[in-house]
């Protein structure tokens, strides 16, 4: 499916492609601003810091590094303009492809992203209640009973959460944009490469050592990514339907329970991420108590 809006294309799987022309004038303006920033902090032999000319700084730093920083600042600005113009709500950071990027010419850049896909939850309440009733609710130890019994209860609860997750994935209908899967697989492969390099192994040597092949590893990564996104989107949709929210005081209480000060600081800076985790857990608790 292709949109009639120039530069905006929505594919059958929900992937969004936005192709935009960036005028040479705009690129040069950002380049000059970036060069001025470098000029303030760059030390050039024979000059005090910040006193060398733009030409001398450009020669010292190199055009490639200046363009790189300029582009890293310019592209997010352009992407935000596109979001506002086309009125869509991306759920991941875009993949960027340079269609053409020659010096002294206009550039053409493609942003690839996606919105949250439509999802059919089915009768998740009945499916979960029916399954859990058959298998029994979680047994909870009474006061004064042994800690081992409490651990058994925690284990049982974890198993029941897994059953709820399995039921949801089996019952929902959703068409995931391919970019969601690809990005996660590529990220895991990148992490695997870093891991094997630290071990002093090639990927082929590592695969041989664990009795796997590159294709099997990729397939496992794809399956894991698919299930993770199915669950993430299903829980988010259920939370919206059931009006499950996380209040600011719940976030702060969670942060205060953390003993490590560095971890506390990190969580305060990532409240949105923490809120998403708490909402996910509240949704699972809600489903468990149906």
Image (cartoon, grey):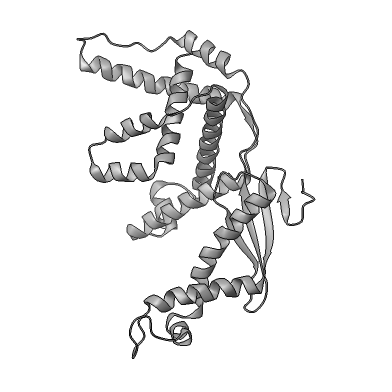
Classify residue 30 by image quadrant: bottom right
Residue 211 image position (x, y, % from top left): 43, 46
156 or 217: which is nearer to us?
156
Classify residue 137 by image quadrant: top left
Residue 187 seen from this side:
yes
Residue 94 image position (x, y, % from top left): 57, 53
Residue shown at the point (69%, 49%) measured from the top left: 86
- Residue 248's place in the image compared with 36, above or below, is above
Residue shown at the point (42%, 29%) measured from the top left: 247
248 or 113: which is nearer to us?
248
Task: Pick the quarter of the image with the N terminus.
Answer: top right
Residue 109 image position (x, y, % from top left): 64, 63
- Residue 85's place in the image compared with 165, above or below, is below
In the rendered image, the residue lying farthest to the bottom is: 46
Residue 162 seen from this side:
no
- Residue 33's place in the image compared with 290, above or below, is below
Residue shown at the point (64%, 37%) measured from the top left: 117
| Left or right of 179 on screen, residue 58 | left
Residue shown at the point (41%, 60%) measured from the top left: 202
In the rendered image, the residue lying farthest to the right is: 4
């Amino acid at each position: 499916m292709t949109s009639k809006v120039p530069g905006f294309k929505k594919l059958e799987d929900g992937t969004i492609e936005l192709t935009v022309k960036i005028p040479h004038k705009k690129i040069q303006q950002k380049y000059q601003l970036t060069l001025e920033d470098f000029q303030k902090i760059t030390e050039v032999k024979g000059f005090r810091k910040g006193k060398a000319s733009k030409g001398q700084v450009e020669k010292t730093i190199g055009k490639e590094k200046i363009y790189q920083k300029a582009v890293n600042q310019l592209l997010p600005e352009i992407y935000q303009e596109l979001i506002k113009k086309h009125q869509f709500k991306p759920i991941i950071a875009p993949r960027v492809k340079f269609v053409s990027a020659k010096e002294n010419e206009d550039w053409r850049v493609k942003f690839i992203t996606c919105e949250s896909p439509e999802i059919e939850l089915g009768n998740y309440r009945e499916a979960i209640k029916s399954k859990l009733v058959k298998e029994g609710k979680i047994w909870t130890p009474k006061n004064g009973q042994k800690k081992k019994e409490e651990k058994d209860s925690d284990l049982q609860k974890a198993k029941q959460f897994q059953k709820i997750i399995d039921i949801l994935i089996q019952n929902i209908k959703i068409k995931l944009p391919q970019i969601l899967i690809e990005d996660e697989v590529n990220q895991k492969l990148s992490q695997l490469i870093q891991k094997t390099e630290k071990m002093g192994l090639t990927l082929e040597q590592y695969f041989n050592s664990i009795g796997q092949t590159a294709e099997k590893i990729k397939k496992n990564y794809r399956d894991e990514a698919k299930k993770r996104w199915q669950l993430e989107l299903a829980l988010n949709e259920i939370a919206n339907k059931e009006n499950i929210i996380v209040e600011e005081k719940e976030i702060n209480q969670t942060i205060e329970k953390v003993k490590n000060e560095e971890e506390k600081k990190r969580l305060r800076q990532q409240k949105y991420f923490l809120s998403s985790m708490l909402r996910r857990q509240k949704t699972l608790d809600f489903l468990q108590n149906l």
